[in-house]
Image (cartoon, rainbow, N blue to C red):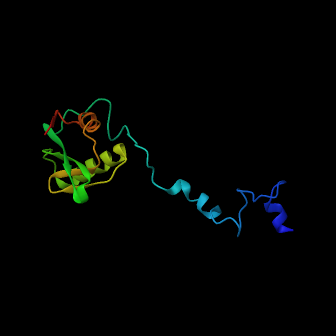
């Protein structure tokens, strides 16, 4: 009798039925806990009016990373390590990519040369140079 409840009038399995026969029923509830793959430009990270204090300039360039993958490198910010981490996290959210801090450089996976300058200017960088 229980199998009859899980099937609709055509005899097919109801996709919303929970139980043993639906292996993805438990995963449906976890979908909202996954990190987003869409860019999230937050106002607190990138205000409309840039702050008056900020790095004088940043150099943005495209390099070949490990395994011949493209990475976008941001250099010349002159920020301490803790601030570089905060900038990296904000840029990762805004660009929906991964990245790392290597010394005084921010390394972002993928080609972001055209979207990155606007984000850096909104973050307070005075001048962005393509290198």
**Residue nearest the observer in this picture, 126 or 110:** 110
Q: In the orientation shown, which residue stands out farthest toward the bottom?
A: 20
Rendering coords of residue 90 (x, y %):
32, 46
Q: Would residue 124 appear left or right of 97 to someone viewing this image?
A: left
Rendering coords of residue 126 (x, y %):
17, 33
- Looking at the rendering, in which quadrant would you find the C terminus? top left
Q: In the orientation shown, which residue stands out farthest toward the top?
A: 49
**Residue nearest the observer in this picture, 41 or 18:** 18
Classify residue 28 by image quadrant. Answer: bottom right
- Looking at the rendering, in which quadrant would you find the N terminus? bottom right
Q: Is residue 15 above or below residue 113?
A: below
Q: Would residue 6 appear left or right of 77 to someone viewing this image?
A: right
Residue at 23% across / 34% down in the picture?
A: 121
Residue at 26% across / 38% down in the picture?
A: 123
Q: Would residue 15 appear left or right of 72 to someone viewing this image?
A: right
Rendering coords of residue 72 (x, y %):
23, 46
Rendering coords of residue 75 (x, y %):
15, 46
Count of numbered marks: 0
**Residue nearest the observer in this picture, 66 or 27:** 66
Q: In the orientation shown, which residue stands out farthest toward the right?
A: 1
Q: In the orientation shown, which residue stands out farthest toward the front?
A: 68
Residue at 26% across / 47% down in the picture?
A: 87
**Residue nearest the observer in this picture, 86 or 13:** 13
């Amino acid at each position: 009798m229980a199998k009859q409840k899980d099937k609709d009038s055509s005899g097919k399995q109801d996709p919303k039925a929970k139980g043993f026969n639906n292996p993805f029923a438990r995963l449906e509830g976890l979908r909202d806990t996954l990190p987003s793959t869409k860019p999230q430009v937050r106002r607190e990270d990138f205000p409309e009016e840039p702050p008056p204090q900020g790095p004088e300039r940043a150099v943005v360039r495209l390099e070949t990373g490990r395994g011949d993958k493209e990475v976008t490198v941001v250099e010349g910010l002159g920020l301490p390590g803790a601030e570089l981490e905060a900038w990296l996290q904000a840029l990762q959210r805004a660009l929906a990519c991964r990245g790392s801090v290597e010394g005084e450089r921010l390394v972002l996976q993928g080609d972001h040369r055209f979207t990155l300058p606007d984000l850096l200017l909104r973050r307070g960088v005075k001048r962005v140079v393509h290198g």
